[in-house]
Image (tube, rainbow, N blue to C red):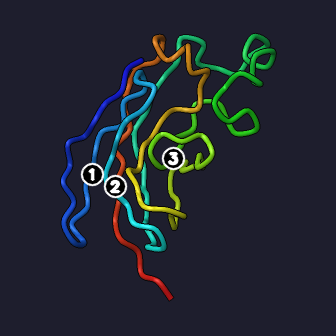
Amino acid sequence: VAIVTSGVDVRGDEMPTVKVLARPNWNDICPVLAGKAYELSAKGTWWDFLSREGKILKRVAHLKRAPTDRWFCLMGAIDRADDSLFVIGHHKTWIPARDGILCCVVNDIPAMHWNNWGSIRLSVQMAEQS
């Protein structure tokens, strides 16, 4: 199982822009605090060997990490926990339910990350809260 750690040490409002790789099962991004709002913005491209959703992908859609969400979309979770999985896509304002490490992953079949390549740049910023 491939896991990538960004090694980012976040202090105060200083937040990272990090590369999220398509191949690892998880990319550890940065610490987050429960109840604080974060703006997540992603740019870039990643690919899969079967890059278009064809008949094969439709037959195995139930096996991807988040079966009802789009193939290969950017997903986030706290501490790699499937019960905290959410779609980031290109942009998301997000308030974590608990403290932990924001981790990101491509929405693919977990055992099939080996045939993915490319990366996305993810910007994480503290958001204004009302």
Q: Name the residue tied to disc 3.
A: 77
Of labels 1 and 2, earlier in sequence is 1
Q: Residue at x 56, y 14 (%)?
A: 111
Going by the picture, which residue comes out furthest to the bottom?
Answer: 130
Please tell me whether mark 2 sits on a helix, a strand or a loop. Answer: strand
The residues tagged by marks 1 and 2 sit, at their Cα atoms, a distance apart of 4 Å
Disc 2 crowd rating (10 Å Cα; few below 14, some 14-19, many 20+) is some
Image x and y of residue 101, in percent: 38, 50
Q: CB atoms at circles 1 and 2 under 8 Å apart?
A: yes
From mark 3 to mark 1, how far is it between C-alphas?
17 Å
Marks 3, 1: nearer the viewer: 3
Residue drawn 36% across the image and 27% down it: 3
Disc 2: which residue: 123
**Number of marks present in the image shown:** 3
Residue, disc 1: 17
Q: Foreground residue, 128 or 44? A: 128
Q: Secondary structure at mark 3?
A: strand
Amino acid residing under circle 1: Thr
